[in-house]
Image (spheres, helix red, strand yellow):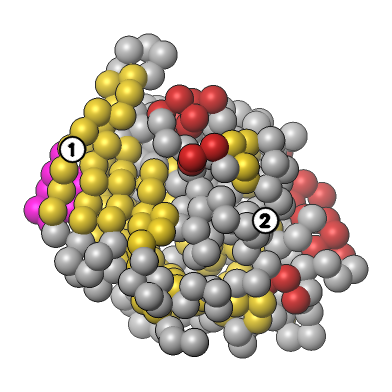
Amino acid sequence: MRIETSPFGRTPDGTDVELYTLTGGGGAVARIASFGGIVVSLAVPDRDGRLDDVVLGFDTLDGYLLHPRPYFGAICGRYANRIRGGRFTLDGREYALARNDGENHLHGGHKGFDRAVWAARIAGAGVELSRRSPDGEEGYPGDLSVRVRFALTDENALAIDYVATTDRATLVNLTHHGYFNLGGAGLGDVLGHVLTIDADRFTPVGEGLIPTGELRDVRGTPMDFTRPTPIGARIGSKDEQLLLAGGYDHNWVLNRRGDGPSLAARLESPATGRVMEVLTTEPGVHFYSGNFLDGTIAGKGGRIYGRRHGLCLETQHFPDSPNQPGFPSTVLRPGETYRTTTVFRFSTHSR
């Protein structure tokens, strides 16, 4: 793999941002920014060998500074996804977090990890980003040290490894918030993409898209992606969960196998032949169908990102886990190490 470094602009406070271009032996090319750990572009071949960028985003840093809310391609933390009421209790003490999604806390708050400039260095065959999240940042306790490593393999797989430690009990739940379109970024919607999720259950939501605490069977519902299903096949149905979210914006409880990364989801574009497999060590994956993209954002090359022009498959612990004792814990304590890996593996299929 070849790695090159170039400038990507400067933040309003004068901090320089670098762009790392990773070129793998299989033909894929990934570009990672030190701002937000953003995957700015990810070009992979189609069935005919043509390279197209398959992630939504912007050509320049200014685009990401101007449009923070879609979280295009960024690392989300200290807690990815929603925490009800922006509050949680840990070891008998209640903590108040930033409320940046109505009454709820979302993706780390007003200035989460997606808005930070990370220290970056080339580490072996990858790029390693690191930062210290100080005690009290966005309301979270403890000094948290985080490292995220990106590597592009010769098999056209982008591997993301996360490591974190703390000096005080805290919450950690990190994810990559990439918006994928296997037809090419800005080239139409993803309703014809075919999705499989290895999950027999999901976490239904109520008001504010906060999980109710139930782990519900997907059978007989539009949430059943245990077999390959076009995304648009049932997205317009009158199902209560789809109406609440305006489409898919839910967490699936993965059928994990073994301790290492296991297959969570498979996405394919019949039009281009591109296939993306998502493997992870996490217990859940959040499938978001781009419901809030509304055609007001011009992305790469000036292309307009309309509704459902991209989708997210965010590997994670479950939303609102700190307030749901039946969900897997997201607590990290001193002396423990948070470790998780997610791999986005690309291939093609013939017509």
Q: Which residues are magenta?
A: 121-128
Q: As rendered, which of 335 and 287 lies closer to the eye?
A: 287
The answer to the question of whether label 1 and label 2 lie on touching residues, with beta carbons closer than 8 A, is no
Residue denoted by label 1: 5
Q: Is residue 146 left or right of residue 280?
A: left
Q: From the top left corner, tell me how far across and down residue 98 is, in percent.
A: 60, 29
Q: Is residue 46 left or right of residue 223?
A: left
* Magenta stretch, overall SS: strand
Q: As rendered, which of 254 and 10 lies closer to the eye?
A: 10
Asked if residue 138 is positioned above or below residue 188 in the image, the reply reads above
**SS at mark 2 in the image:** loop
How crowded pointer 1 is (Cα within 10 Å; few <14, some 14-19, many 20+) is rated as: some
Question: As drawn, which residue projects farthest toward the right?
Answer: 238
Which residue: 54% across, 25% down? 66
**SS at mark 1 in the image:** strand
Q: Quadrant of the N terminus?
A: bottom left
Residue denoted by label 2: 308
The amino acid on which the numbered mark 1 sits, given as a three-letter code, is Thr
Question: As drawn, which residue projects farthest toward the top?
Answer: 13
Q: From the top left corner, tell me how far across and down residue 22 is, in percent.
A: 22, 52
Which residue: 31% across, 29% down? 8
Asked if residue 153 is positioned above or below residue 335 in the image, the reply reads below
Q: Where is residue 194, by image quadrant?
A: bottom right
Q: Disc 1 or 2, which lies upstream in sequence?
A: 1
Which residue: 83% across, 67% down? 236
Asked if residue 7 can be seen in this view, the reply is yes
Q: From the top left corner, tell me how far across and down residue 182 is, in percent.
A: 50, 65
